[in-house]
Image (cartoon, grey):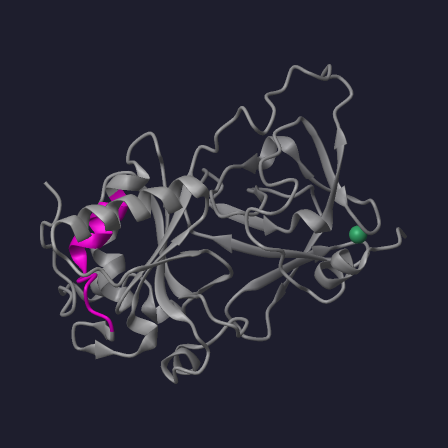
Amino acid sequence: MKKLTPQEEQIILHKGTEAPFSGKFYRHHQKGIYICRQCGAPLYRSENKFDSGCGWPSFDEEIKDAVKRTPDPDGLRTEISCAHCGGHLGHVFSGEGFTAKNTRHCVNSLSLDFVADQTVPSGTEPSCAQKTPALQTAVFAGGCFWGVEHLMAQQNGVKAIQCGYTGGHLANPTYEQVCSGKTGHYEAVRIVFDPKLVSYETLAKLFFEIHDPTQADGQGPDIGAQYRSVIFYTNDEQKQTAQKLIGILKSKGLNVKTKVLPLQDFWPAEEYHQHYYQRKGTQPYCHRRVKRFD
Ligand SMILES: [Zn+2]
């Protein structure tokens, strides 16, 4: 088996997670086979790779019998590992609707190596820089995530939406831990959107209109650090858009408290927090739309 670097060991042996959007196979579009970084076993075909916008390589099917599924100790997620050597790959999710197979293997680039298909002459595939991903990710925190999720989900072009926790220092926190205020996390919503149907600017404007960005100590009746207003950007363009919109609101006299921070780990919240108002058939107590732009 291949000798691993300390970085690879952290992922493959200690089940770590690389930072989103950081891996070399995230925006990789060559034809070929993805193999296990540790033992070289073939794991995924490029035909099954798709752009989920989540920040990690995504596949909707594995090579037969190549990947082992194990429930995580927390009972929430399903770990995937190399069936040959046991090396950690990531997690598998279903029911998100990205492709017809309704499955997303979310895999660390550091767990993979790539063998290009020899029948494809080099130079005929689009390079990463040329090809924009089909879907992008946006993350907003603006108070109780039930309300933010419910109102943002109604925007055309939103392909998937999820409540979760980000911005803190504890891995995979529970709701109770976040509520204690000791983990540094915010209640946040992760949106996967199709930029051909809705721009990031439109989403960010909507975010500013469904919550009160001038409230410093929380949102509405929910007071606490985890309820404060933050835009977590995933690229420089999003950062600039967020800062531009804050400038516009300030020029209208609003004392905007929204912070603009780089996205780090996003931990999906417990299942009972997902699509809360849709399931209950009720309306948010904490969020309603107020027009703040033209
Ligand atoms: Zn392996």
The vertical placement of 207 against 144, above or below, is above
- In the rendered structure, the answer to whether residue 85 lies left or right of residue 139 reads right
The quadrant holding residue 85 is bottom right
Q: Is residue 128 visible?
A: yes
In which quadrant of the rendered view does residue 189 lie?
bottom left
- What residue is drawn where x is 70% and y is 60%? 11
Q: Who is closer to the viewer here, 77 or 145?
A: 145
Which of 250 and 105 lies nearest the eye of the viewer? 250
Q: Where does the image place residue 192, in percent across and percent down from the top left? A: 38, 46
Figure check: 202 above or below 221: above
Q: How many marks?
A: 0
Task: Give the extent of the magenta segment.
Answer: 203-216
* Quadrant in which residue 18 is drawn: bottom right
Q: Which residue is painted at 57% across and 47% down in the image?
A: 56
- Left or right position of 187 against 266: left
Residue 48, how many percent across, how many down?
A: 59, 35
Quick one: 276 or 207, which is closer to the camera? Answer: 207
Q: Is residue 206 located in the magenta-colored stretch of the structure?
A: yes
> Is residue 153 or residue 74 the one in the foreground?
153
Residue 289 on the magenta span: no
The vertical placement of 67 against 166, above or below, is above
Q: Position of residue 281 (x, y in %)?
A: 16, 63
Residue at the image point whose x is 12% and y is 50% from the top = 252
Is 213 on the left or on the right of 138, as rendered?
A: left
Q: Position of residue 110 (x, y in %)?
A: 71, 50
Question: Residue at image x 66%, y 63%?
Answer: 16
